[in-house]
Amino acid sequence: MTPPLSFFEIVWLARWPLLYGLGTTVAISALAILGGTVLGTGLGLALTYGNRAMRGIARVYTDVIRGTPVLVLVLASFYILGTVGLDLSAFQAGVLALTLFCASHVGEITRGALQTLHKGQTEAAKAIGLTFGQTFRYVLGPQALRLALPPLINTAAEMVKASTLLSVIGVAELLLRTQEVISRAFHSLEFYLLAGLLYFLVNFAIERLGRYVERRVSLA
Amino acid sequence: MTANLLEIRDLRKSYGPVEVLKGVDCDVRAGEVISIIGSSGSGKTTILRCVNMLEEFEGGTIRIDGEEIGYSTAGGQRKRKAEKEIARQRALTGMAFQQFNLFPHMTALENVTLGLTLVRRMGREEARALGETWLDRVGLLQRKDYYPAKLSGGQQQRVAIARAIAMSPRLMLFDEVTSALDPELVAEVLQVVRSLADDGMTMLLVTHEMRFAYEVSSRVIFMNGGRIGEEGNPREMFAAPKTERLAAFLQSSRFN
């Protein structure tokens, strides 16, 4: 009878599913953060500068989405969208749910940052003849980004954590892969700790990247 | 007869139920320096802000070189012009603000060149050269790579004036440009404004600096309750005010 495999030998055997899971987690998070940032910036602009109707729509959107548990959004986008003919894979549905969630947060962060800026900034830009697009791109955007960076990094980290919820609809991200490995090889404590460490590393990388960007754009 | 550079006719503006401009008429010829004085709330600043469309206005017309600003009237219908067109018209005037409003994430030079590259479509080098020329003119060439936070209030205001004037506007608007400054920094800013006036720049300035208004203006407009209370040559007006309101206002103003 061969001696039982050590934990590290099992990890080595299970390295591909785990790495695949980690890759999926990173892909989900990256897509959701990217899509959420683009959509959220638009929402923030609508909340700040939109006319009454635009502000109203954006406000209802952010309040409803932010007030809904992410798990509910994930389940809804997987099970409900199918019934109305929008047939998404679990991965697509999950990414969609996280993107919408992320956008609602980025929208609020963007609005907050833009409203903090003194209105003299907009007026000075207008006074030299800049259009609204130019004003946002060269004057307001860069200043808002500096203010919004810390909460944006926080939201990005939240998205990585929220990606675990996609395991519920069968997306083989890191948590689900870890559970699959545990169901065959036991060592549940060690594998959960390993998964925790990997999540930490992803978020640590995001945080370092954020700090780096903050330093790069700081005025000091 | 020289044509008017700026022509304001029956300008009316309300904030909600409060009418702040109750029909203002004003003509400015090229090269004139006009000071607008009056107590706060009399509508001085609002006039400037209407001229470059930072405020909408409900009645009257403003023309620069005969071109109607902000609105077009066709068949009795008054319509706000398209945003792009308004942006172009805003560049006809330059404005300096009480609070400077420099862009804090850009150096002094970048503040000046932003409009040159984006609005005047100059190449990077040309914009840079012109920006440096104007910073030199306001005495801040050595500070061109400083961020606004590292400049004194007076220096920031001089950069802000350079930023506006570098765009070669037809008309400069100065909105209480020394009101937010420490007393010892007022002179350096007024010196810049005065040198622009000496160059023949057409300007409209709202100010509380009575002595400066007296010395530099070709004409003074006294605003009173949303209307022009009195207007004329500063020497005559200050020596012999025709209205009691102006007399009282001058009495309460400091001449230093």
Image (cartoon, rainbow, N blue to C red):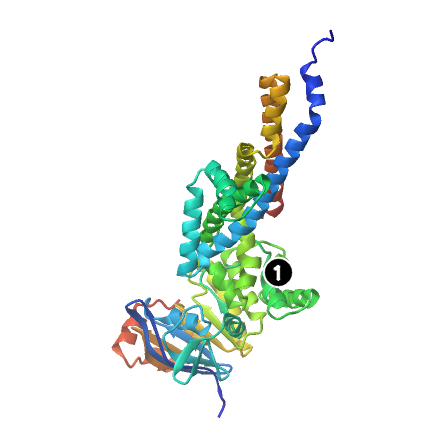
In this picture, is B25 found above or below A49? Answer: below
The x, y position of residue B84, in whole percent, is 53, 71
Residue at image position (63%, 45%) is: A216
Question: In the rendered image, is residue B169 in sight?
Answer: yes
To which quarter of the image does residue B41 belong? bottom left
Q: Which residue is mark 1?
A: B109
The x, y position of residue B120, in whole percent, is 61, 71
Quadrant containing the N terminus of chain A in the rendered view: top right
Q: Looking at the picture, tell me which residue is in the foreground, A56 or A74.
A: A74
To which quarter of the image does residue A91 belong? top right
Q: The numbered mark 1 sits on a residue in which chain?
A: B
Type of the residue with mark 1: Leu
The x, y position of residue A14, in whole percent, is 69, 24
Residue at image position (56%, 77%) is: B199
Q: Looking at the picture, tell me which residue is in the foreground, A58 or A151.
A: A58
Question: In the rendered image, is residue A152 in sight?
Answer: no
